[in-house]
Each structure stands twice: as structure tokens, then as C-alpha cells.
């Protein structure tokens, strides 16, 4: 009888442990799911904000000064200049067709955020009133309008890309063509945009000058997108030589939350062994690292250099090309 009680107690203990582990697994899964949900919500909010900037750039600067940009929005602008049809209608109509092609060719997974982006941008194009020519820049300052409009739209698209979003348009064309032909995405987008902008020459007000304005806006947009994306993701590499390497390495771990590697070196002049701290961090974290080193060892020797690409935990995700 005592033996049976012992067996029963062991079984109860095993069941309790199993239930506890199961409960812990569920709690961990819920926590991960909740965290991912908040990340997704934040990204969707930033996508909407970026698209708002993009739509505002067109309504405030490019459309009032009759400047044609790239992408499906550029096609919408051409139709608007020629017929007066609102840009939102043309933009949504073309993207609806392209999305159907993309879903069939690439799959629904790629298209989900693109569908969201197309709907949000269509709404913004519909509700944001178009400014009167000369409202934000002078009546004849078309060059200033294309630069500011290109810069603002580039910042908006950069924010969208950072949030893993898309505004649709020629992005969809590029994805589909790239799947079946060995042509880079950048080249496809460039060909499409140049063709769209050059088409403005055949409008009533068309001229070589208008094409130059459109190409200037396109170039400014591209530079702004690169500035936003690379400005956030730009990384730096440190080599720190100090006798207080242990304190510095620990402090960087604790305060900056970056991994530190200690290398063994030798000073060739002194022929003495030396420890070298190696750190890779975001550019905006550089000032924290400099302050840590200065506080611990003002005489430390520091080398900082830009890192073109850093992939792995804490940085960009490795992607197969």
C-alpha cells in the first residue's frame, strides 16, 4: 500500500511538472505573439505615416507645378494633366490590375502589405487637398518645387521601406519581371521611371525643361530614400587599445548592449602583448562608446571606421541573393 502511494505521488509530481512546463510554453508563446503583434502594428503605423508624406509631397509641390515623377503615381500625374481625372483614381486602378497579376505570379504573402499600402495611399490622395500653385514656393520656382517635393516623397518612401512596406506600382512590375527575367530590380525601376517622365514631353505644356524637372525630382527622391535607409542602418567598427580593456568591454556590454570581442595583439615597437577591443555598432551609438572609453581611460587609442554591411543578430537580416 505504501509502495502504491509512492508511485501515485511520483505520477502526480510528474503530471504537475508536465502541466507547469506546458503552461510555461504557452505563456512564452503568447508573449512572443504579443511582441510580434506590437511590432507589426508599429510597422503599419509607420507605413501609413510614410505614405502620408509621399502623398503630401505630390499634392503640395509636384502636382501644382506640373512636375511628373516616376512610378504609377507619375502615370496618374500624366493622366491628371491631360484629362483632369484625379490621381487617386488612376493610381488605384492601375495598382488593382498589377496586384492581381502579382498575386497570381508571386503569391499573396508578398501582396498583403502592398495591398495595405495601395489602399492607404489612395485614401491620402483622395482626402489631401491639392495646393494652389505658389502656395509653398514661388509661382515660377518650379525647380525648388521639384527638389522639395522629391526630398519629401523620398523621405516618405524611405520610411515605408524601413517598415517592410510598399506603395505598389512599378515595384510590382519589377518583382514580376525579375522572377522570369535576369534583370535587376533597380534597372527595371529606372527604365520604367525614365519612360514615364519622358512621356510628359507629349503633353500641351511638355518640354525638355519639364523632363529635366521630372528627372531632378526622381534623383532627389532616390537620394532621400538612400539617406533615410542608410542613415538608420549605417554601422561602424571600433578598434580600442587600452590597458583597461576589461572595464571598457564590460561597460560597452552593459550600457550599449553590443557584443565585444577581445583580440590578442603585439606592439611591434615595444614588443609587448596588447589586448584589442573590437566592437561593431550603429553609427548613432558611437558617442556612447566614446564617452565610455574616455571616462575609463582617457589615454586609450581608438580607431573608428564605417562598415558597409553588417548582418546578424542586432543588425540586418542575412538575405540570399
Image (cartoon, rainbow, N blue to C red):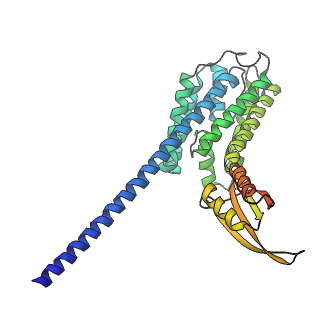
Q: Locate residue 155, reporting x and y percent.
A: 67, 36
Q: Residue at x 47, y 48 (%)?
A: 108
**Quick check: 109 above or below 139?**
below
**Quick check: 175 above or below 3?**
above
Q: Residue at x 60, y 59 (%)?
A: 254
Residue 209, visible in the rendered structure: yes
Image position of 189 (left or right of 126): right
**Outermost left residue:** 1
Comparing 109 with 148, the one in front is 148
Q: Locate residue 311, reporting x and y percent.
A: 64, 60
Q: Quick one: quadrant of the C terminus?
A: bottom right
Q: Residue at x 53, y 44 (%)?
A: 101
**Quick check: 220 above or below 20?**
above
Comparing 128 with 289, the one in front is 289
Q: Locate residue 196, reporting x and y percent.
A: 70, 34
**Quick check: 147 above or below 275?**
above
Quarter of the view holding residue 179: bottom right
Residue 317, visible in the rendered structure: no
Quarter of the view holding residue 304: bottom right
Amino acid at each position: 500500500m505504501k509502495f502504491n502511494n509512492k508511485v501515485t505521488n511520483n505520477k502526480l509530481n510528474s503530471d504537475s511538472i508536465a502541466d507547469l512546463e506546458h503552461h510555461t510554453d504557452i505563456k512564452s508563446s503568447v508573449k512572443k505573439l504579443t511582441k510580434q503583434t506590437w511590432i507589426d502594428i508599429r510597422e503599419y503605423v509607420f507605413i501609413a505615416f510614410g505614405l502620408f508624406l509621399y502623398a503630401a509631397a505630390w499634392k503640395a509641390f509636384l502636382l501644382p507645378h506640373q512636375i511628373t515623377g516616376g512610378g504609377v503615381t507619375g502615370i496618374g500625374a500624366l493622366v491628371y494633366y491631360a484629362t483632369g481625372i484625379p490621381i487617386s483614381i488612376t493610381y488605384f486602378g492601375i495598382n488593382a490590375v498589377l496586384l492581381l497579376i502579382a498575386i497570381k505570379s508571386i503569391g499573396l504573402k508578398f501582396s498583403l502589405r502592398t495591398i495595405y499600402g495601395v489602399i492607404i495611399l489612395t485614401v491620402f490622395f483622395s482626402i489631401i487637398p491639392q495646393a494652389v500653385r505658389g502656395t509653398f514656393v514661388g509661382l515660377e520656382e518650379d525647380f525648388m518645387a521639384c527638389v522639395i517635393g522629391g526630398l519629401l516623397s523620398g523621405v516618405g518612401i524611405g520610411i515605408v521601406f524601413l517598415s517592410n512596406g510598399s506603395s505598389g506600382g512599378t515595384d510590382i512590375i519589377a518583382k514580376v519581371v525579375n522572377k522570369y527575367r535576369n534583370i535587376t530590380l533597380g534597372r527595371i525601376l529606372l527604365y520604367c521611371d525614365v519612360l514615364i517622365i519622358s512621356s510628359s514631353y507629349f503633353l500641351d505644356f511638355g518640354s525638355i525643361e519639364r523632363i529635366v524637372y521630372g528627372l531632378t525630382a526622381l534623383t532627389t527622391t532616390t537620394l532621400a530614400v538612400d539617406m533615410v535607409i542608410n542613415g538608420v542602418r549605417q554601422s561602424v567598427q571600433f578598434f580600442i587599445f587600452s590597458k583597461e580593456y576589461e572595464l571598457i568591454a564590460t561597460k560597452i556590454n552593459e550600457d550599449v548592449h553590443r557584443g565585444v570581442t577581445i583580440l590578442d595583439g603585439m606592439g611591434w615597437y615595444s614588443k609587448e602583448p596588447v589586448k584589442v577591443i573590437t566592437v561593431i555598432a550603429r553609427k548613432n551609438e558611437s558617442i556612447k562608446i566614446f564617452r565610455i572609453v574616455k571616462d575609463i581611460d582617457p589615454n586609450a587609442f581608438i580607431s573608428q571606421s564605417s562598415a558597409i554591411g553588417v548582418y546578424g543578430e542586432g543588425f540586418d537580416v542575412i538575405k540570399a541573393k
